[in-house]
């Protein structure tokens, strides 16, 4: 599969009468967005607001962040199996609106959504403070069940991102990157002397409201399987979960997975990056055993020399991570695991719930229990009334002056386990 | 908690779903349970069958508690 990824730089977003792109400015039609969202009869009300880098604005409770993209050529459309038909994607050309995102907000679970600060100390901890964010604050109809609310907000975000992405279809990109993965045997023939490296991509699937979708399938119902990396760039994997904000993979993270991009950078030079194995993080032990058995089996079957394994979330998925690591290593395939840590506020506690001596190469996205004080902001997009209960918050987190004392856990993307942020750990 | 209680001389059975974590943290008597969100029950069963399941798990745990062990032991069926 060969995909041309055309990046269109956007430096500003404004409301306008039609949705269009002009001189690096994206104009979006607010009424069009509202009427698109209100087609869903689960939704009572939506506010559409723009947050720009440097604004004294706090966005919360954040559910998902999505990058607008559009297929220009090649089969299928963005978000196959959900927004577009379930065609296999990853070939042809895709345009990306760089510097902009759609942020969905809503008090779905309350304690399991995140915070994005557009300025101040909190902004340094989230990559999304650097984007022009089109925020959708979505209220459900009365007595809508949580999981139906989640589905409605998820679909609203994906539909709006798809609508906005279309503005880039006819625009000449600032830069075009080419990514290509060949069928396995051809790939091995092409670089016979390079080590064959794969990527084991663990997806959050801990149950209702903790789900990830692959071509429209709830990933807790899959057995591990193989994807071409370019499929992910076309939205084959997307987030449908409400879990701790710091280390969940938003849809934006999936679209821009830095492990995939970095492996491509080394492809054909230092390594032969042959593909991705996706797997899940289920709540039954038999599922954990089966999935990790299968990732190990597939690694061996593909003849890999080494893999990178990335985790999503924390707690019992630590076991999935360690099982994957242990079983893949036992097949004679080297592993590096990418995770984050819950090492206590002083960093002195055990970082993961599970461990094994074979997990001897670890990359960490930082300690989610570190405390940060977020100063009050002039503007809040969304609402603050759940901050004392948010995962990483505590009774008294929200102070009288509007400042918030919390763990990094509350900040969307702060300790991302794909390495999509700046935090890590050094030994001394 | 399992280890601290055992340190006082009282035997403990750890009933849990993720047995590998229980082994890693050092529990000595482990009874595997149903699933992480509902360790001691199964909402997909009807209430009568679920009660049987719960009783079976508790009885297994009590039996484990009475059993002498020399090493970490997982009480499978």
Image: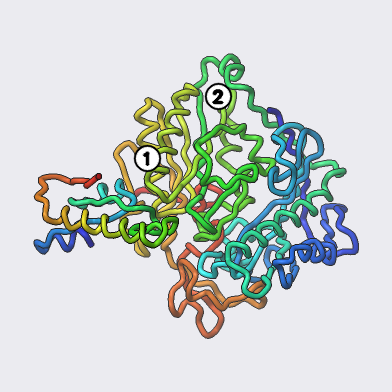
| Residue A184 place in picture, x, y as percent | 58, 21
| Same subunit: marks 2 and 1 | yes
Element type at marker 1? helix
Q: Name the residue under label 2.
A: A272
Q: Residue at x 52, y 44 (%)?
A: A221
Which residue reaches farthest right? A17
Between residue A417 and residue A143, name the one nearer to us: A143
| Residue B61 place in picture, x, y as percent | 21, 56
Q: Name the residue under label 1.
A: A323
Q: Which residue is drawn at 40% across and 34% down?
A: A293
Q: Residue at x 84, y 44 (%)?
A: A169
Q: In this view, does A165 lie above or below A107?
A: above
Mark positioned earlier in the residue sequence (2 or 1): 2
Chain at numbered mark 1: A
Between residue A32 and residue B19, name the one nearer to us: B19
Q: Residue A168 carries which label?
A: none
């Amino acid at each position: 599969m060969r995909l041309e990824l055309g990046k269109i730089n956007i430096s500003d977003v404004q409301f306008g009468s039609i949705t269009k792109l002009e001189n690096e400015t994206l104009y979006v039609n607010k009424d069009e967005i509202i009427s698109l969202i209100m087609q869903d009869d689960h939704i009572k009300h939506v506010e559409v607001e723009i947050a720009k880098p440097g604004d004294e604005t706090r966005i919360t409770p954040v559910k998902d962040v999505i990058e607008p993209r559009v297929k220009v050529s090649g089969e299928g459309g963005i978000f196959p199996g959900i927004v577009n038909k379930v065609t296999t994607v990853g070939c042809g050309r895709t345009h990306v609106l760089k510097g902009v995102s759609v942020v969905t907000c809503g008090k779905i679970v309350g304690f399991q959504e995140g915070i994005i600060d557009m300025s101040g100390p909190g902004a340094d901890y989230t990559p999304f403070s650097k984007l022009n964010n089109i925020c959708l604050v979505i209220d459900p109809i009365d007595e809508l069940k949580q999981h139906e609310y989640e589905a409605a907000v998820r679909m609203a975000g994906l539909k709006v991102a798809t609508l906005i992405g279309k503005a880039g279809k006819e625009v000449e990109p600032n830069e075009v990157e080419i990514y290509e993965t060949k069928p396995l045997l051809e790939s091995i023939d092409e670089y016979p002397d390079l080590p064959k490296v794969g990527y084991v991509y663990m997806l959050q699937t801990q149950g209702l409201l903790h789900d990830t979708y692959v071509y429209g399938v709830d990933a807790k119902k899959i057995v591990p399987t193989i994807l071409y990396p370019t499929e992910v760039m076309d939205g084959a994997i997307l987030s449908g979960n409400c879990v701790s904000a710091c280390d969940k993979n938003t849809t934006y993270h999936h679209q821009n997975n830095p492990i995939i991009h970095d492996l491509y950078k080394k492809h054909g030079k230092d390594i032969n990056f042959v593909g991705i194995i996706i797997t899940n993080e289920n709540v039954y032990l038999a599922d954990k055993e089966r999935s990790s058995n299968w990732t190990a089996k597939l690694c061996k079957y593909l003849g890999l020399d080494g893999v990178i394994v990335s985790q999503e979330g924390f707690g019992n998925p630590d076991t999935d991570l360690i099982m994957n690591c242990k079983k893949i290593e036992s097949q004679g395939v080297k592993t590096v695991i990418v995770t984050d840590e819950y090492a206590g506020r002083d960093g002195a506690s055990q970082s993961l719930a599970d461990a094994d001596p074979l997990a001897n190469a670890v990359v960490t996205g930082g300690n989610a229990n570190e405390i940060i004080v977020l100063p009050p902001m002039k503007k809040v997009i969304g609402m603050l009334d759940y901050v004392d209960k948010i995962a990483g918050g505590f009774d008294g987190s929200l102070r009288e002056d509007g400042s918030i004392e919390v763990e990094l856990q509350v900040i969307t993307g702060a300790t991302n386990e794909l390495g999509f942020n700046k935090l890590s750990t050094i030994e001394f | 908690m399992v280890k601290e209680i055992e340190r006082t001389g009282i035997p403990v059975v750890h009933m849990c779903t993720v047995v590998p974590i229980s082994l890693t943290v050092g529990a000595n008597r482990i009874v595997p349970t149903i699933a992480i969100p509902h360790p001691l029950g199964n909402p997909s069963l009807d209430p009568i069958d679920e009660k049987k399941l719960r009783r079976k798990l508790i009885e297994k745990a009590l039996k484990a508690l009475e059993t002498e062990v020399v090493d970490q032991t997982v009480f499978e069926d």
